[in-house]
Image: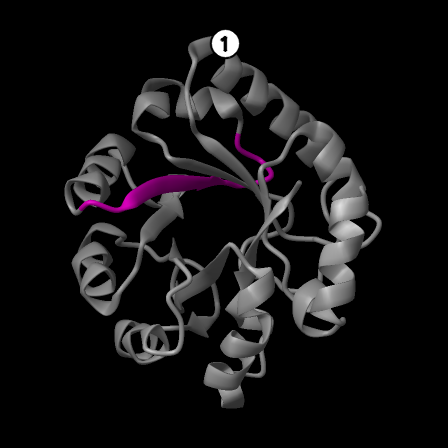
Amino acid sequence: MLKCSTSLWSADLANLGAEIRRVEPFSERFHIDVADGHYVHNLLFFPDQVKAMRSHTKTPFEVHLMVTDPMSWIEPFVEAGADGIMFCFDAVSNPGEVLQKIRAAGKQAGVSLLITESLDLVEPYWELLDVLTIVGTAMGIKGASMDASVPGKIRQAKQIIKDRGLRTEVEADGGIRRETVPLLKAAGADFIVPGSLMFKENPVEMRAWLASL
């Protein structure tokens, strides 16, 4: 069954503690988008905020760094309680160095690939990847439709993982809707990153629907 890395960007940001507790039973982990206003034109989540949220749940926190300098943010988010950290592939010149720093901190390491980026970019780093996030919309945009290339990219990634005997999880992020989730399931995604699908619907009914796919 598809697992949920629930995006807290879509929660009621004025009541995060209550929102976390409300959907916690239906979430395998929480996806926390971090934006610095430079890599994307948003400002989202920061270490002290994540530290404050940490006290509301034991569910793992997956921090997605949409920032221009991922290396400088690893330690602050580790200290804040992150269980996994992923970053945008095109934000750094040496992805392997960043992945190794995350893993050295004892955390799950991942990268996110933009719509325009090929899986070929990941080739040197598969052994360092715990999570590969396939982004289906323009980075930093909420509510957009999923690009049609995503299911094919997921299938390709899953085949590489199978052929190499890896345990890398493939996650789909962006455009997670009732009409797109079945396509992601069929493609072999391990996780989806639901936002409004979780917070704007009844999470009990939504998870029952996911289980029926």
Residue shown at 22% from the left, 55% from the top = 74
In this picture, is 75 found above or below 54?
Answer: above
Is residue 66 covered in magenta? no
Quarter of the image for residue 47 reads bottom left
Residue 203 is situated, as x and y percent measured from the top left of the image, at 70, 67
Q: Nearest the camera: 93 or 61?
A: 61
The answer to whether any part of residue 34 appears in the image is yes
Query: Does 205 sit left or right of 191 as displayed?
Result: right
Residue 20 is situated, as x and y percent measured from the top left of the image, at 51, 75
Is residue 114 covered in magenta? yes
The answer to whether any part of residue 149 appears in the image is no
Disc 1: CA contacts within 10 A as few (<14), some (14-19) or many (>=20): few
**Magenta stretch bounds:** 106-117
Q: Residue furthest bottom?
A: 14
Q: Where is the C terminus found, in terms of image quarters?
A: top right
Q: Which residue is mark 1?
A: 163
What is the count of numbered marks? 1
Residue 83 is situated, as x and y percent measured from the top left of the image, at 31, 54
Element type where label 1 sits in the image:
helix
Q: Nearest the camera: 19 or 121?
A: 19
In this picture, is 54 found above or below 134?
Answer: below
Question: Callout 1, which amino acid?
Answer: Asp
Query: Does 19 sit left or right of 60 as displayed?
Result: right
